[in-house]
Image (cartoon, helix red, strand yellow):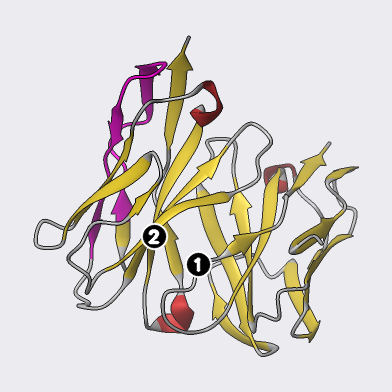
């Protein structure tokens, strides 16, 4: 089974600064999808950004961008101009094309934004 | 216009009781999931249904039984509740195929006393 590793249980960033959250994964598949989800204290899971493995171009959504390194099996999330509302738990997720389109989630990174 | 809804949002019950959590999605998706999130925030897949058929059944005690009456609903019934069942349970849905993310419900916080 695929595994997703988030090696930073907690991170903090000053408001308006930039922070990068790390994610690595293990797979033998060549085609798959990667996602970052945000879970604020309200506990609602919100999609932040997604990336198709066969696309070399890194995905960008406003202040959120990814650094996708397929060979290294790395998928980091960069948050620019951090805002107080970015404080949340962030989960990296891998979606396989097999086994029922199953999603595999990392253990999460808790992000604190310091005013 | 809620996409994925769950009821109830909070559930407090005694050990040994039987309880159900309901999930409904109005996105027209054909695949639904149940996850358990423990106190350390780890998300674990429990079940997945595609077009009302069970396709993922992870190692979960058989006290947990999912029921999918139609593609828009996936309910979770739990028998003989135990203290260790206390967690937040998330329902999610997606459309089978490429590039499709999961949409999550608001979660149900289950507390077993």
> Are labels 1 and 2 assigned to the same chain?
no
Q: What is the distance, in whole Å, between disc 1 and disc 2 at their CAs?
A: 8 Å
Secondary structure under tag 2 reads strand
* B55 or B84: nearer the viewer: B55
- Residue B25 in the image: x percent, y percent? 76, 71
Residue depicted at 41% across the width and 62% down the height: A104
Residue that numbered label 2 is attached to = A50
Relative to residue B20, is residue A81 drawn left or right?
A: left
- Write down the region rendered in magenta: A4-26
Residue B101 is tagged as 1
In this rendering, position of residue B63 left or right of residue A63: right
Q: Residue at x 31, y 46 (%)?
A: A65
Instruction: From the top left corner, tell me how far across and down residue B83 is, in percent.
Output: 74, 42
What's the chain of the residue with tag 2?
A: A
Disc tally is 2
Q: What is the secondary structure assignment of the residue under circle 1?
A: loop
Q: Residues within 10 Å of mark 2 (few under 14, many from 20)?
A: many
Would you say B14 lies left or right of B46 here? Answer: right
| Disc 1 + disc 2, Cβ < 8 Å | yes
Residue A7 among magenta residues: yes
Q: Nearer the viewer, residue A63 or B84?
A: A63
Chain ID, mark 1: B
Where does residue B1 sit, x and y in percent of width and height? 82, 62
Q: Report the side of B55 relative to A103 (left or right).
A: right
> In the picture, residue B78 is in which quadrant?
bottom right
| x and y, in percent, of residue A13 in the image | 36, 18
Against B65, residue A92 (above or below) is: above
Extreme-front residue of the structure? A62
Local packing at callout 1 (Cα closer than 10 Å; few below 14, some 14-19, many 20+) is many
Judge whether A86 appears above or below B100 on screen: above
In the picture, the quarter occupied by the N terminus of chain A is bottom left
């Amino acid at each position: 089974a695929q595994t997703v590793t988030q090696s930073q249980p907690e991170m903090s960033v000053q408001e308006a600064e930039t922070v990068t959250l790390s994610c690595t994964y293990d797979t033998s598949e060549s085609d798959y999808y990667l996602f970052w989800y945000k879970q604020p204290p309200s506990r609602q899971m919100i999609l932040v950004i997604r990336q198709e493995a066969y696309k070399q171009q890194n995905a960008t959504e406003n202040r959120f961008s990814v650094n996708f390194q397929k060979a290294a099996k790395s998928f980091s999330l960069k948050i620019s101009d951090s805002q107080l509302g970015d404080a949340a738990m962030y989960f990296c997720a891998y979606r396989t094309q097999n086994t029922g389109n199953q999603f595999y989630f990392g253990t999460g990174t808790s992000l604190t934004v310091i005013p | 216009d809620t996409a994925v809804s769950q009821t109830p949002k909070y559930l407090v019950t005694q050990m040994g009781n039987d309880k159900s959590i309901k999930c409904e999605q109005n996105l027209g998706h054909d695949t639904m999931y149940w996850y358990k999130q423990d106190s350390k925030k780890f998300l674990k897949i429990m079940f997945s249904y595609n077009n009302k058929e069970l396709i993922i059944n992870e190692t979960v005690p058989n006290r947990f039984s999912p029921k999918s009456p139609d593609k828009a609903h996936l309910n979770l019934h739990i028998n003989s509740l135990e203290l260790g069942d206390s967690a937040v349970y998330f329902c999610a849905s997606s459309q089978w195929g490429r590039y499709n993310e999961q949409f999550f419900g608001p979660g149900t916080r289950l507390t077993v006393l």
